[in-house]
């Protein structure tokens, strides 16, 4: 019997293996940009997916079936998730900095105007507004699921989480359609670069969050969560709310003010 409430993690091969799998993707991208094939990218993606699945499987087993996640461990993991979200805030802060640096004082090379000459921005109150409504509704539905879990209402929690997933994937579909309709590309001056970098990385975060919530949905179906033990869902909900807030700033600054 251990004389402390903390979880001493056993030796695991997954962090080291996953680091090599993730490294294969940017290296493969460099090879692809230099005229090579995409085999290394796909290999890294498949390996990362499989290794992450086994890593998460171990964490689920330790928390749900072995009972290693005591209140002290949960508190530490919560702080870790919070710090991760803070790092994501800093990540997007760089994109906003680049956008406002270029838009508040447009250079002569782009016509000293914003948007630059020749750029036709997207209509503010069409698809972007619909995207905003969809993502805000998903924030409401995941809050619904959270309160249902805390009240031990399992069917209601499943409905709320399923609604969130539908809205999340619908947002991605709308974003894809929007990209297909844009009259500019990522190569069209600093406007195209900052627009597609900021909105594209946000879309990637929505995809990661939807994957996170899909895992939570499967765990919820298997009765892994109750009103006292649902840190996995709570972390996913925090991440999803972060994605919502970032999109609000993107919509106001890039789609509305920047157009």
Image (cartoon, grey):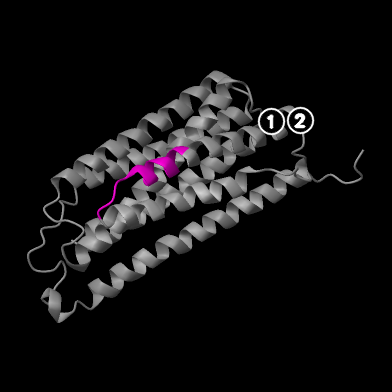
Query: The C terminus appears in which quarter of the rendering?
Result: bottom left
Q: Contact, CB < 8 Å: mark 1 with mark 2?
A: yes
Mark 2: few, some, or many residues within 10 Å (few <14, many ≥20)?
few
Please tell me which residue is depicted at 57% across the width and 46% down the height of the picture: 17
Q: CA distance from mark 1 to mark 2?
A: 6 Å
Q: Is residue 144 left or right of residue 136?
A: right
Left or right: 138 with respect to 219?
A: left
Q: Is residue 35 left or right of residue 97?
A: left
Q: Is residue 151 left or right of residue 35?
A: right
Q: Is residue 30 visible?
A: yes
Q: Name which residue lies at 73% across and 44% down.
A: 11
Check disc 1 and report its element: helix, strand or loop: helix
> From which residue to which does the magenta span run?
35-46
The residue carrying mark 1 is: 61
Of residues 128 and 86, the one nearer the viewer is: 86
- Residue linked to disc 2: 66
Q: Position of residue 212 (x, y in %)?
A: 50, 37
Tell me, yes or no, if residue 251 can be seen here: no
Camera-nearest residue between 189 and 234: 189
Residue 194 image-quadrant placement: bottom left
Which residue is pictured at 40% across the width and 37% down the height? 138
Q: Position of residue 181 (x, y in %)?
A: 14, 45
Q: Is residue 47 above or below residue 259?
A: above
Q: Position of residue 218 (x, y in %)?
A: 53, 25
Q: Secondary structure at mark 2?
A: loop
């Amino acid at each position: 019997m251990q004389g402390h409430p903390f979880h001493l993690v056993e030796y695991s091969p997954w962090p080291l293996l996953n680091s090599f799998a993730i490294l294969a993707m940017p290296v493969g991208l460099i090879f692809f940009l230099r005229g090579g094939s995409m085999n290394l990218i796909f290999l890294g993606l498949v390996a990362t997916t499989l290794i992450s699945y086994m890593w998460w499987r171990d964490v689920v087993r330790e928390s749900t079936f072995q009972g290693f996640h005591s209140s002290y461990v949960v508190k530490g993991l919560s702080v870790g998730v919070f710090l991760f979200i803070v790092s994501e805030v800093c990540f997007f802060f760089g994109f906003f900095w680049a956008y406002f640096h270029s838009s508040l004082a447009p250079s002569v090379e782009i016509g000293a105007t914003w948007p630059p000459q020749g750029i036709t921005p997207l209509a503010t109150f069409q698809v972007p507004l619909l995207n905003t409504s969809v993502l805000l509704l998903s924030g409401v539905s995941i809050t619904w699921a959270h309160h249902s879990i805390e009240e031990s209402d399992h069917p209601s929690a499943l409905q709320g989480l399923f609604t969130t997933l539908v809205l999340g994937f619908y947002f991605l579909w709308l974003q894809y359609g929007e990209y297909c309709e844009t009259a500019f590309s990522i190569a069209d001056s600093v406007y195209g670069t900052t627009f597609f970098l900021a909105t594209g990385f946000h879309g990637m975060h929505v995809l990661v969050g939807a994957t996170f919530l899909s895992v939570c949905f499967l765990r919820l179906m298997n009765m892994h969560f109750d009103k006292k033990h649902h840190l996995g869902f709570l972390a996913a909900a925090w991440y999803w709310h972060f994605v919502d807030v970032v999109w609000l700033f993107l919509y106001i600054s890039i789609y509305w003010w920047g157009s």
